[in-house]
Image: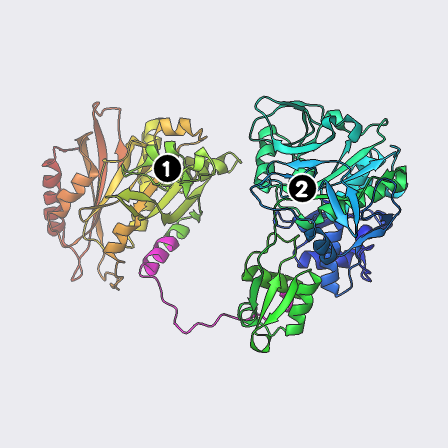
Amino acid sequence: MKISPQWVREFVGLSVDDRRLAEDLTAAGIAVEGISGSGADTVFEMEIGTNRPDAMNHYGVAREAAAIYDLPLKELSSGFRLPASGGAGAKAQSSVKESNAALKRRSSTGRQGGSKKKTSAAKAASSRSSGGTTEVVPFPITVEEPELCPRFSARVIRGTQIQASPEKIAHRLQLLDQRPISNAVDATNYVLWEMGKPTHVFDMDLLEGGRLIIRHAKDGEKLKTLDGVERTLSPEDLVVADGKKPVGLAGVMGGFDTMITDKTRNILIESAWWDPVTVRKTSRRHGIHTDASHRFERGADFESTVLSCDLVAARILESGGGELVGGAIDVVSRQMDQAPIVLRLSEVQRILGGNLKTREIFRILKKLGFGLIPEGQADAQIRVQIPSWRLDVEREIDVIEEIARLHGYDKFENTLPAYSGAVVELPHAAMDATLRERALALGYNEAVSLTFISHAAAENFSSGAAVLELENPLSEEASVMRTSLAPGMLDMVAWNLNRDSESVRLFEMGRVYEMRGGERVEPERACLGATLAAVKGSLPAGGVLDVSKDEHAAAAEAFRSFKGDVDNLLAGFAYSELSFDRETAEYFHPGRSARAVMDGTVVAQFGQIAEGVKAERKLRQDVFLAEIDLDALHARGLRQVRFAPLGKYPAVERDFSFVFEDGVEFEAMGRAVTELEIGELREFTPIEIFRGGSIEAGKYSILLRAKLQSDVGTLRDEQIAAWAGKIVGALQGLGGVQRA
C-alpha cells in the first residue's frame, strides 16, 4: 500500500526527513519497502502486516511516528464545523475534532440494549431527549443481526451538489493510485486513507421504504454491485437493505442502483462495524476484494463509526454545500469493549533483558493510545486498557512486544539466556556426523525436503504401514506426513534437472512418520539421490568395467559405481558380514537394484529408479536412489579404526577367468573363496565382465583377481599355486568353467 509522508506530517510535527522517517518506521515494524517521488509528491511503498489494520492509513502511521519521536499527535479534524444534534438546517454546534477518548465517551452514551435483540433507530431511538428538547432521527435504521453488526452510524445531508473534488483531495488520492470520481465518493475514499475506516454514501432518494435494514439476504435475491455485476445472494450473505431490496453487501461493496450520480442531491452516509469472519466469507464467495473488505476482514475500529461519518460529511459540505438533517444516527446493539490486560513490570524486564525505566514504558504505551492504571505496591504492575483500534493486542506478551519495538530492538544489549546445565550431545550425533562426512566426501550435497507428501506418493513409496494424515492440509499434494524420503529426493533431483543442472548428487537425513500398532513412530532415515551423469562422471578410468558396449551393460556399470558409494557409507559402521540381495521395492529397476543386509539385518536398499517412476515424474535422466535405515545403523555403532602397519613383504596377484551361468553372482563367489580361510588372502575382487562373442547366451565371462600377501616372509611359488588351486576348486564348485 502507499502512504504520503506529507499527509502524515499534518498530524505530527516531524523534524526528520522522509528517508530517516522510513528507516525508523521500518525498525518499529511498520515496513517501508520503497520510496518514490520527491517533495510533496513523495510516496512510501508500505508493507503492513495483516494484524495491523490500524496502521493501514495516514493517521495510524502518524500515531506510530509520534510514539517513535515522542511528539504530540494532533487530533483528527476536518477544519469544518458540524452540528452534534438538532433538526434540519441546525446551526453548527461543534467542530469535528475529537480524540479517541472523547469519541469513546460520547458513543457510549447512546448505546442500546442486548446483543440478541433486534435494534432499530426507528423504535429504540426514534426520539432522543436532551435538556427538554426532542430530536427526531432523520432516517430510521433497523439492525436484525446485532451479532454481525454491533454498531451502525449514519449522517444525512440534503441539498448538496455532486461535482469534482477540490484539488488537494483529488491530488492526494491520485498519489495513492486512487481515481477521483466525485466529491461525495472521494470523501469516503479520503477518510478511508486518512483514518482507516471504510464508509459508504447512498443516494437517499433512491432508497425505497424510507429506512435501512441490516439483515441476511434471502435465497436467490439479486444485487447489482458498484462494479456493474449482478450477483445472486444466499442466506449466508449479510446485506444492507432498504424497505424493498438489498442496496449493499455488508463490508464489501455498495449497490449500483443507489450509487451517487450527478443527479444526487440528498445523501445518506453510512459507517458500521462488521463481523470480520462474515465479511471474509462473503468476499471470497463472490470473488470481490475491496479496500473496505481488506480492512473489515482484519477488524476495524469499533469506536470510529461516528467520527468517520462526521469527517465524510464535512468533506462533502465543504465542496458541495448543503445542510445536515439532525445529528448523527448511532445504533449500538452490542458493546465491543476489550478486557484490560495486567502488565507486570518484572515480566517486561525478564523478557526484554534490559533495564527499561518505568517512565519509558508509560511513555511508549500512552503514545500508542493505551490507557494505564498503576496497581500493586510501588507500581509493580499496570492495568492496560487496550485502545479500540488495536484488536491484535490480547495478551501481556503483546503489550511487551509493543514496548520492545517502539523502544528499539537495536537498543537492547546482546545477552545470552541464563543456563545452568551443560551441552549434551545426542546419542547418535557421532554416527550421523560420520555418515554426513562420508557423503560430503563422495560429492553429495546435503538437502532438506518437505515433511508433507501426497497420498499417491505415500502409497507408491510406503513400507506398508498406515500413514499419518493432516487434519488441515495446505493442499492435496501435502496432505500426509512423509513415509519415505524418496519422494522428496526425487522432487529435488527433478527440480535441478529442470534447471539444466545435469550432474546432481544430493543426500538427506531426517525422520519419516508411520502408524504401527495404533501408535505413531518416527524412524530416522537417510537418502541418496544421483543422476546418471553424476554417476558416470565418477567412474574410474580402467576400473571395474563391463566391457560390453550395449546400453544395458553401461547402465549396469553405473549401478555398480553407485553401489560403491553405498558401500563407502556403510563401511563406517561395525559389522561382521555385509551381503546383498535383490529383494527391493517395486519403484526400483529389477535388474539394477539391491538390498544391503548387515549381519542379517536389512540396512539399505538402492539402485536405479524404475522406468515407470521415471516417466511418471518426468525425470530427464536415469536417477539412482538409496534409502538407508539409520535406526538399524545406530544399533550397530561405528567401526573402530585400528592401526595396522604396511606389509614388509611383497604382495602377489593372481587372475582367474571363469564362465558362469547368469544366475551365479559375485556374492556367491566371494563367499565360497572366503570360506577357504586363506589367511594370506587380502583381496578378492571382480575386474572385468564380458557377454556375447564366443560366450553362450545366458552365460558371462568374469575376470577375478586375488591378492595374496604374508606378514612373515616372501611367498613361495608352491604356496601360491596351492592357494590358487583351492580358489579354482571353490569356483568350479559353483558351476564355473575356467577359461584358458
Q: Nearer the viewer, residue 477 or 8?
A: 8
Image position of 393 (left or right of 257): left
In this rendering, is residue 533 above or below 244?
below
Local packing at callout 1 (Cα closer than 10 Å; few below 14, some 14-19, many 20+) is many
Amino acid identity at mark 1: Phe
Magenta-tinted stretch? 409-437
Q: Which mark is residue 624?
A: 1
| Residue 350 visible in this rendered orientation of the protein | yes
Q: Which mark is residue 470?
A: none
Depth check, mark 2 against mark 1: the one in front is 2
In this rendering, is residue 374 above or below 230?
below
Q: Nearer the viewer, residue 315 or 288?
A: 315
If the image is split into quadrants, where does the N terminus sit? top right
- Place of residue 554 in the rendered image (x, y in percent of width and height, measured from the top left): 35, 31
Give the spatial CA distance, label 2 vs label 1: 77 Å
Verify whether residue 667 appears in magenta. no
Answer with the quarter of the image where residue 372 lies.
bottom right
Local packing at callout 2 (Cα closer than 10 Å; few below 14, some 14-19, many 20+) is some
- Place of residue 333 in the rendered image (x, y in percent of width and height, measured from the top left): 63, 44
Amino acid identity at mark 2: Ala
In this rendering, is residue 293 above or below 661?
below
Q: Residue furthest bottom?
A: 378
- Place of residue 189 in the rendered image (x, y in percent of width and height, measured from the top left): 77, 40
If the image is split into quadrants, where does the C terminus sit? top left
Image position of 132 (left or right of 220): right
- Place of residue 573 in the rendered image (x, y in percent of width and height, measured from the top left): 27, 55
In this rendering, the count of numbered labels is 2
Q: Nearer the viewer, residue 558 or 388?
A: 388
Q: Write down the residue under mark 2.
A: 124
Verify whether residue 431 appears in magenta. yes
SS at mark 2? loop
